[in-house]
Image (cartoon, rainbow, N blue to C red):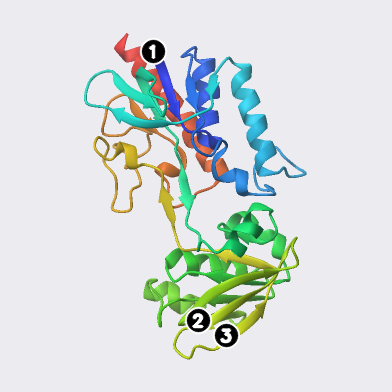
């Protein structure tokens, strides 16, 4: 059993930024990187909208730099993940996957969220090689200026992303599984009015087509008529939602209906459990950007520092 001042659960921009601030405040943070060290950014090929990188940087390279910066201030960065917690007492008990028990005075949760994908083999292939599959139009839409893209989804965020892409791309084809949108009327009306958005209802993706390196099209089927068609495109965007990685906290923390951790006090990183703070996409279903995650990582470390100062 190990006693520490500050445990950070999860890496990514939120976790690493929290580690940088906590380490500089001499809180000797221990960070567990989680299932996907570096988080969602490791599936993003080019990051061009993070301040301080005028020439852009790849997601994985940026995570390596953030990790190195956290280590520079003696953050204890560990491979592995926390799979059980007990926040019922003053000391926050956490266990790693191999049974190591940690008692932390403060905990910063930066476990993030995972984009939902269709699960097609072809989709995963072009996602993993950076060949044109993305779950973030705001992050990657810029790379498809003047090109034709396909987006899958039926909710508000799908409509919002399609609208965003329509300003950059020559044509946006929306594939909607049912006969109508799930989105609010205002959002669905908005995309219906855009001249370069084509909406195909009752349509499912069968396969993402490509030349082995990049996406060249999508093979889709109309579920009502059983008619198949090939849609040429260079980008395939998936907007069917995100799943926050918060399951292990549900017995102790207040979550919203989709599983995102609720902030106890707006404008802070505090949860309903004193000494437990949250940063990044585990609590943010609105912005989901690296820069906002990093900002809340800073807030969580400062809030944790103030909590410890008031306690001692």
Q: Earlier in the sequence, mark 2 or mark 3?
A: 2
Judged from this view, the residue extending furthest toward the left is: 88
Q: Are marks 2 and 3 in contact (CB under 8 Å)?
A: no
For image coordinates 42% across by 46% down, the residue present is 284
* Element carrying mark 1: strand
Q: Is residue 22 above or below residue 130?
A: above
Decide: is 190 above or below 90.
below
User: Is disc 3 placed on a helix, strand or loop?
Assistant: strand
Mark 3 neighbour class, 10 Å CA radius: few under 14, some 14 to 19, many 20 or more: some
Q: Is residue 37 above or below residue 284?
A: above
Task: Tell me residue 93's x, y (percent).
Answer: 31, 22
Figure check: 249 above or below 130: above
Q: Give the crowd class for mark 2: few <14, some 14-19, many >=20 residues within 10 Å.
A: some
The x, y position of residue 116, in whole percent, is 47, 57
Residue 154: % across, % down: 44, 71
Residue 2 is marked as: 1
- Residue 103: x and y, percent? 34, 17
Which numbered tag is attached to residue 165?
Answer: none
- Label drawn at residue 192: 2
Give the position of the N terminus as an image quadrant.
Answer: top left
Residue 182 occupies quadrant: bottom left
Picture quarter containing residue 2?
top left
Q: Residue at x 41, y 51 (%)?
A: 243
Q: Residue furthest bottom?
A: 225
- Which mark is in front, 2 or 3? 3
Label 1 and label 3: CA atoms lie apart by: 59 Å
Q: Which residue is mark 3?
A: 228
Q: Nearest the camera: 161 or 228?
A: 228
């Amino acid at each position: 059993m190990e006693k520490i001042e500050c445990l950070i659960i999860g890496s990514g921009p939120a976790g690493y930024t929290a580690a940088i601030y906590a380490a500089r405040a001499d809180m000797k943070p221990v960070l567990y990187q989680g299932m996907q060290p570096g988080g969602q950014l490791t599936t993003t090929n080019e990051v061009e909208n993070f301040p301080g990188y005028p020439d852009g940087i790849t997601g994985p390279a940026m995570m390596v730099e953030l990790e190195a910066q956290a280590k520079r201030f003696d953050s204890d960065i560990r491979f592995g993940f926390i799979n059980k917690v007990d926040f019922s007492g003053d000391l926050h008990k956490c266990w790693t996957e191999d049974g190591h028990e940690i008692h932390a005075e403060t905990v910063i949760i930066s476990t993030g969220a995972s984009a939902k994908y269709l699960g097609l083999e072809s989709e995963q292939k072009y996602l993993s090689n950076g060949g044109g599959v993305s779950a973030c139009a705001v992050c990657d839409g810029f790379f498809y200026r003047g090109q034709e893209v396909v987006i899958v989804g039926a909710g508000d965020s799908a409509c919002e992303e399609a609208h965003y892409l329509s300003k950059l791309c020559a044509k946006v084809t929306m594939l909607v599984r049912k006969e109508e949108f799930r989105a609010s009327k205002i959002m669905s009306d908005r995309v219906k009015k855009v001249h370069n958005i084509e909406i195909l209802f009752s349509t499912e993706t069968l396969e993402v087509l490509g030349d082995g390196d990049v996406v060249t099209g999508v093979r889709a089927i109309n579920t009502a008529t059983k008619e198949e068609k090939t849609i040429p495109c260079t980008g395939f965007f998936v907007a069917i939602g995100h799943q926050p990685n918060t399951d292990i906290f549900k017995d102790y923390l207040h979550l919203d209906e989709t599983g995102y951790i609720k902030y106890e006090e707006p404008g802070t990183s505090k949860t309903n459990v004193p000494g437990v703070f949250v940063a990044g996409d585990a609590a943010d279903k609105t912005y989901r950007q690296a820069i906002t995650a990093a900002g809340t990582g800073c807030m969580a470390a400062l809030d944790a520092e103030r909590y410890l100062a008031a306690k001692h």
